[in-house]
Image: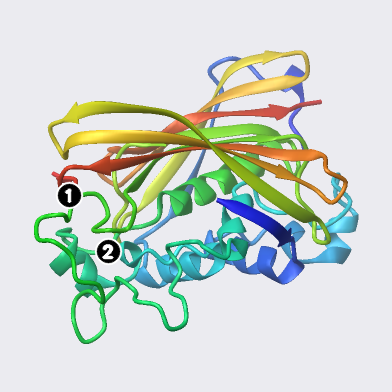
């Protein structure tokens, strides 16, 4: 189900909760699927004793992946043409993430969106943009 | 990174979709996918990142018989100089940015190649992690016909010390 340009206005928003109480197991799942086995994400002993972080933390790409789900739920399957982000804060086990897409522009069959993912404290963990084809 | 052969497979797409908590049947149910606009199973937007699985030299995957920097008997399997913990503890830094441009969406049966070339590098001073060194890389994913399907731009950052999360 794709978006119709005629139904969209600048400033429209779409939000989803990406994850509630992020589990270390999901981070392990992402490591296995993506092939990024950096121990910082799954190895508590390495991460606390060697790298100096309070605990393991999520791959930025896990947050981007979950945010991509919000986007495809909004714009429809196979409609994304661009998706780019900056990772601004780490995502930790226990975090609850919410992501919002905001319509910046609709023209020539393309919607341009701003994308922001925040944690339970309202801190932005990732921000960026996306573009998608609309009907 | 150079990947000579990245076969896009249905079970890998399913596992990847599960790992990002996406239960959209277009990622695992071929019968359902047939009735959608793409008309077939496609891969989620960030799936191309898992090309790491097919990079023989990918340094964030343990390899048989080689030292690995994660914990075992000791907190790390590799002896390192003291004080080098910042930004990944030998893990190659942190991911600062990622950008994808989709020329089309990946489907099971695609066989991709990926070639990466370095982009810009720059430095920045940060209160939370000291000196930051950013480096950009651009990866082109091409399909079995040699057509460009995804252009990816990643930015990694090396930090002077671990990022203060407060």
- The residue positioned 43% from the left and 70% from the top of the image is A28
Mark 2, other Cα within 10 Å: few <14 / some 14–19 / many ≥20 = many
Q: CA distance from mark 1 to mark 2?
A: 12 Å
Q: Which mark is residue A56?
A: 2
Q: Does residue B42 appear anywhere in the picture?
A: no
Instruction: Give the residue drawn at x 40%, y 73%.
Output: A25
Q: Are labels 1 and 2 on one chain?
A: no
- Quadrant for the C terminus of chain A, please: top right
Chain that bears disc 1? B
Residue occupying the point 28% across, 43% down: B158
Q: Vertical placement of A74 versus A12: above or below?
A: below
Relative to B143, residue A127 above or below = above
Q: Are marks 1 and 2 in contact (CB under 8 Å)?
A: no
- Name the residue nearer the viewer: A29 or A69: A29
Residue drawn at the location 88% of the way across and 46% of the way down: B145
Report whether A72 appears left or right of A121.
right
What is the chain letter for disc 2? Answer: A
Crowding near the residue tagged with mark 1, few <14, some 14–19, many ≥20 C-alpha atoms within 10 Å: many
Name the spot of residue B142 as percent of width and height, x first.
75, 44
**Residue B148 image position (x, y, % from top left):** 77, 38
Mark 1 sits on what residue? B162
The x and y percentages for residue A52 are: 14, 59
Task: Tell me if I can see residue A92 in this picture.
Answer: yes
């Amino acid at each position: 189900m794709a978006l119709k340009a005629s139904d969209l206005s600048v400033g429209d928003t779409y939000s989803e909760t990406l994850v509630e109480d992020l589990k270390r197991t999901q981070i392990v799942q992402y490591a296995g699927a993506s092939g990024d086995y950096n121990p910082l994400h799954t190895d508590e002993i390495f991460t606390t004793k060697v790298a100096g972080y309070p605990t393991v933390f999520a791959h930025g790409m896990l947050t981007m992946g979950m945010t991509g789900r919000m986007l495809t739920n909004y714009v429809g399957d196979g409609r994304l043409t661009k998706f780019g982000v900056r990772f601004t804060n780490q995502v930790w086990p226990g975090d609850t993430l919410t992501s919002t897409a905001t319509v910046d522009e609709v023209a020539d069959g393309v919607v341009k969106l701003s994308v922001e993912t925040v944690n339970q404290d309202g801190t932005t963990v990732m921000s960026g943009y996306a573009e998608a084809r609309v009907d | 990174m150079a990947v000579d052969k990245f076969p896009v497979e249905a079970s890998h797409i399913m596992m990847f979709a599960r790992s990002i908590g996406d239960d959209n049947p277009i990622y695992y149910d071929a019968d359902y996918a047939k009735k959608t606009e793409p008309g077939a199973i496609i891969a989620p937007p960030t799936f191309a990142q898992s090309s790491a699985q097919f990079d023989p030299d990918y340094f964030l995957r343990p390899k048989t018989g080689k030292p690995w920097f994660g914990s075992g008997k000791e907190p790390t399997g590799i002896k390192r100089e003291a004080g080098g913990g910042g930004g990944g503890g030998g893990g190659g830094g942190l991911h600062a940015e990622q950008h994808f441009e989709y020329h089309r969406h990946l489907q099971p049966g695609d066989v991709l190649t990926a070639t990466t070339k370095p982009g810009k590098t720059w430095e920045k001073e940060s209160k939370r992690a000291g000196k930051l060194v950013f480096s950009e890389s651009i990866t082109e994913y091409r399909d079995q016909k040699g057509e460009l399907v995804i252009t990816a731009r990643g930015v990694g950052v090396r930090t002077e010390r671990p990022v203060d999360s407060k």
